[in-house]
Image (cartoon, helix red, strand yellow):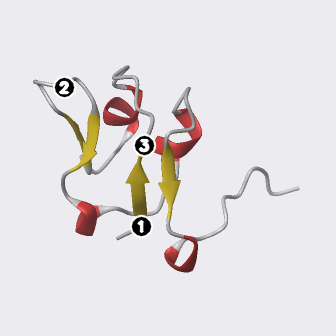
Amino acid sequence: MTIKKIQGCIGCGTCVQTCPTDVIRQDPETDKAFIKYSADCQMCHLCRLYCPEDAITINAEKSIPVIISWG
């Protein structure tokens, strides 16, 4: 699993919308994000980068560096 935890979610849904592999879902009862399909995570970091509350923690041991630019 690449996403370690989601803590401090405000229910904005940004991580759900940005995840290209549908790993994160939003609980209809609590309106909070949760990790649904952790095995499908491609380590793109989009959920973490776009989260306005910095609520997503990525596992460091399985994480790859994020490339900001090539030059």
Chain-order first, disc 2 or disc 1: 1
Q: Which mark is residue 2?
A: 1
Q: Quadrant of residue 41?
A: bottom left
**Residue type of the residue flagged with mark 3:** Gln
Query: What distance separates the C-alpha of mark 1 from that of mark 3?
Result: 15 Å
- In the rendered view of the protein, which quadrant contains the N terminus? bottom left
Crowd class of label 3 (few under 14; some 14 to 19; many from 20; radius 10 Å)? some
Q: Considering only vertical position in the picture, is 46 above or below 1? A: above
- Tell me the residue that label 3 is attached to: 7
The residue identified by callout 2 is 30
Of all residues, the one furthest to the top in this rendering is: 12
Tally the marks. Answer: 3
Q: Position of residue 62 (x, y in %)?
A: 50, 77
Image coordinates for residue 64, horizontal then vertical, percent: 59, 71
Whether tag 2 and tag 1 are in contact, CB under 8 A, the answer is no
Mark 2: which amino acid? Answer: Thr
Whole-angstrom CA distance, mark 2 to mark 3, is: 13 Å
Instruction: Give the label on residue 28, or none.
Output: none
66 or 1, nearer to the observer: 1
Where the C terminus falls, by quadrant? bottom right
> In what element is the residue under mark 2?
loop
Image position, residue 18 (x, y; %): 40, 35
